Amino acid sequence: MRHTHTKQESAAESVNLTPLIDMVFILLIFFLVTASFTKESGIDVDRPTAQTAVREEQGSMIIGVSKDGEIWIDSQKVDMRAVRAHVEHLHAQNPEGTVIILADQNARTGTTVEVLDQVRLAGVSNVSIAASNE
């Protein structure tokens, strides 16, 4: 007994999925390329407010200072004595990069100034202290 194919069965069997798969991969690549990835300091900081705060472009290195005096660089807790070495290492990788110090408004001023001093001693001249403009 011979089985005959109808027009509907042959049309369903000949659907080519290659263009659909290609389109999905193109969309995936597009979204991966256009997604922006931001660096974080590793801690949540309540920034102080300032009337003259302006938006800077994303810096290459963010140093967080918590209200407890902890210092965070690239999601790692760093001792004050190691800040200069970390900054020198990261600055050597990206000499044109800037440093943003993200200090909590309740952090000791002395700790923030010490971090700023260590960053300057590491040879970075473009240093900003983050504030919100509210």
Image (cartoon, rainbow, N blue to C red):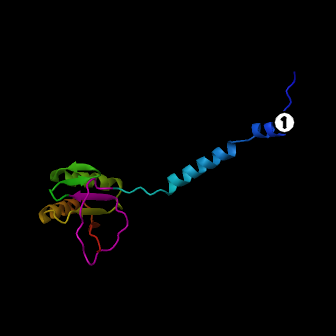
Which x, y percent locates residue 88? Answer: 26, 54
Whether residue 2 is situated above or below residue 63 in the rendered picture: above
Which element carries disc 1, helix, strand or loop? loop
Q: Mark 1 — residue?
A: 6
Q: For the view shown, which residue lies furthest in the front direction? A: 1
Classify residue 64 by image quadrant: bottom left
Which residue occupies 35% across, 53% down?
A: 93
Q: Residues within 10 Å of mark 1 (few under 14, many from 20)?
A: few
Q: Is residue 110 left or right of residue 60?
A: left
Which residue occupies 25% across, 51% down?
A: 86
Q: Which of the pair 102/14 is nearer the observer?
A: 14
Which x, y percent locates residue 83? Answer: 20, 54
Q: For the view shown, which residue lies furthest in the bottom direction? A: 51
Which x, y percent locates residue 97? Answer: 34, 61
Q: Which of the pair 28/63 is nearer the observer?
A: 28
Q: For the view shown, which residue lies furthest in the top direction? A: 1
Which residue occupies 44% across, 57% down?
A: 36
Start-end of magenta stretch: 40-65
The verdict on residue 63 being magenta is yes
